[in-house]
Image (cartoon, coloured by chain):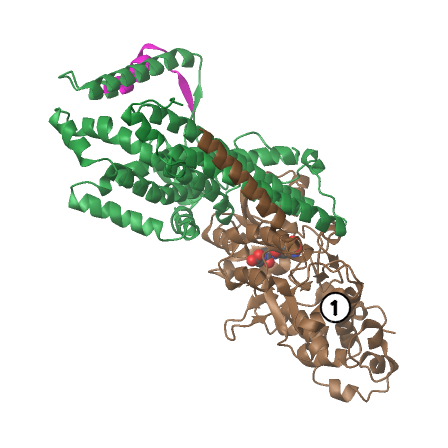
Amino acid sequence: MKKIIVALASLLVFAFVLGACAPAPSAPQIVKETVVVKETVVVRETAAAAAPKATAPAAPPAPAVLGARFKAINDRKKLICGVNDALPGFGYLDKATGAFAGFDVDFCKALTAALFNDVKAVEYRAVTAGQRGPALQTGEVDVLIRNTTWTVTRDATWGLFVATTFYDGQGMMVNTKKNPTVKTLKDLKDASICVQTGTTTELNLTDRMRAENTAFKPVVFDTADPTFAAYDEGRCDAVTTDISGLISRRTLLKVPGDHTILEAVMSKEPLGPSVPTGDSQWFNVVKWAVFELIEAEEYGITSANVNQMLTSKVPEVQRILGVTGDLNKTLGVEKDWVVRMVKAVGNYGEIFDRNLGPKTPFNLSRGVNNLWTKGGLMYAPPYR
Amino acid sequence: MTPPQSSASVSARTSVPFWRDVRVLTILAQIIFVVAVAVAGGYLYANLASAMQRRGLVAGFDFINNESGFEIGETLIPYQPTDTYGRAFLAGFLNTLWVSIVGIILTTILGVSVGIARLSPNFLLSRLAAGFIEIIRNTPLLVQLFFIYFGVFVRFPSVAESLQFPGPSFGNQRGLFFPKPIPLESFPAWAIFVVAGIFIALALWIASGRGQSKLPLGWLGFAALIAFPIIGSLLLPAPFEFEIPVRERFNFKGGLHISPEFGALLTGLVIYTAGFIAEVVRSGIQAVKRGQVEAAYALGLRGGQVLRLVIFPQALRVMLPPMTSQYLNLAKNSSLAIAIGFPDLFSVTATIANQTGQPVPVILLVMVTYLAISLFTSLLMNIYNRYVQILEK
Ligand SMILES: N[C@@H](CCC(=O)N[C@@H](CS)C(=O)NCC(=O)O)C(=O)O
């Protein structure tokens, strides 16, 4: 018995010594890892899981100083961009090239081009819906561009949203071959509905169905693949997410033609990039990168004609392309940053059409995502 | 503890160094665990507090009493979106507890059977058991769960083509549906018959262990176990009525329902853990000296009796600590549920964290809860372990 006590006592002492010795400065990383690993254990077997750990020291945790993150990015000569890897058209791994591609990914590329004049100077971190909040909170990524809805909770607790790049709404998809009579949400009474956790859609679902007084059974998964696989196999009668997400994922189903997206728009889903809090300079750079891609479209600057446009006489075009003035200095970027972006990925309209437009399997029309001059909501404040 | 005496056997026992004493080790393991968790937790807390302060986040548990506003697929307690986050948490917790308890019982039965089969002189049986163990232990549980869920449970026929079993029970890709017994007035009286049957069976089973009767007492006990409830239901008015599942537009409603998510998670956890338990059982049995077995046979005990009266009680002492860790593993592994859509504690809290934007307090709560489940399981196992150890003279 005595021995046991001695053993326990020495153990306790040992533990305290250990506790006292561990260096405090490394602590933030410990925090970061618990959060991320907690998610990772369950979620991922891909390379993405290992990435945060291996490269964690590169990203400083939420610098509170003006420009600290922006400086860190420039010093490391690489942008860390949180993206989706499971949403064709928006953020996915292109089967042909094995590289990240999509509407959201193009904004990462534009930023990289603006900063380093090199679309390769970027590290993509694939994050699931549940992982992205902590990734932003801990400053694991410099910018999150992953079909993420702008909400007040996320603005207050995750990071700061900079702009909306895609106005969307939540939709409901059903297999109309199996259930031809389902036309409205009410028709889904007592149905099983597949949904992904960590999303706004998970939360809207209950709200909408309650408003419709319609009981249902959610089946909740943590990534898009099992969510849609379970739906495709018939485990659920319907699946819900952003309409863009439904259109995108429908192309991966066994028989895409069997599935219909109901007319009901269940919510507002403004999707756009967000950055960690604490660096308003970096925040501004990302914000104006988005705006200038929109303005480029507005003033007819395209990847094809950007060189000719340098000689344009229109004062706005001259300012945007850095021919006159030094507005770039207010942001801390190079004079030709917009030229670089447009050369790399084109203007907003080109990005949209290349990834989602009529020539793609998604065949999305611009609709509400058209320029304000064409009846849409895309409106950039003046660059002056 | 026994005061040191001149007896040789006593001094032999006390000379077992503490670092090899199973009882000390289990306690030690837990204390190390608690201390490690406490130290790590202290750090994390200090850092979190400062990091969160820098970001202007307030950690708190105030949200617990707010309306949850989200639906949960299956719960053991009545739950609706107008209930609080606290209740949603409780519902998830109970789901975890339920799958863990049922899982531990079933995996013990399966694991012990496979472990014994592994040592069977029957070549085919022992090879089969060995094959099972190797395959199960050497593939990741997550992969097995995906296979069981997407490869088996979700591949059942659609609702329209449901399989029908006697009962009537139904099976389809939305799960298994059984008639649900609803107790009637005569249920308590009938329950007395059932309990009597169980007692008689137990008594006979213990008696048969003495091996002094020519009668097959074990089998008689088994007969009593079955016969008493039947006699009871013949003598009394029906103790139950049954709620039969009925097909509706999308699915069956009513009756007892086992969802594919629960079914797949339970199956996966049971099979996976049984692979490890089988090895624990095998090593436990092999740790019993051959002489013990030979002596038991020499005393005239029969095969089953040797296993039950001589081998198992001794093997149990070796088996219990590793068995405890397998039980803990099962409970913790149940957090993989979210991968296959079962709303366990982890899944529900993921939604809570998402909805409140408060991952930190929520994750802390989850950690503490799993810790509590683990410590409680260890406590029970340690009490049992002590009880088993005392039998040793
Ligand atoms: N816009 C919504 C939903 C975004 C979302 O996560 N959509 C899912 C379904 S399409 C997705 O992209 N999943 C990919 C993954 O996590 O692997 C939000 O911000 O919460």
Instruction: Residue A343 in the image: state x and y as whole percent.
Output: 69, 81
Circle 1 sits on which residue? A70
- Colour that chain B carries in the picture: green
State yes or no: Cβ of the residue under disc 1 lies below 8 Å from any atom of ligand 1: no
Quadrant of image for the N terminus of chain A: top left
Can you see residue B347? yes
Q: Is residue A146 above or below residue B358?
A: below
Can you see residue A377? no
Instruction: Residue A75 in the image: state x and y as whole percent.
Output: 70, 72
Instruction: Residue B221 in the image: state x and y as whole percent.
Output: 24, 18
- Colour that chain A carries in the picture: brown
Q: Is residue B51 left or right of residue B325?
A: right
Quadrant of image for the C terminus of chain A: bottom right
Q: What residue lies at 28% left-to-right and 28% top-to-bottom?
A: B313
- Residue A59's image quarter? bottom right
The answer to whether residue B170 is magenta is no
Q: Is residue B85 left or right of residue B132?
A: right
Residue segment shown in magenta: B223-242
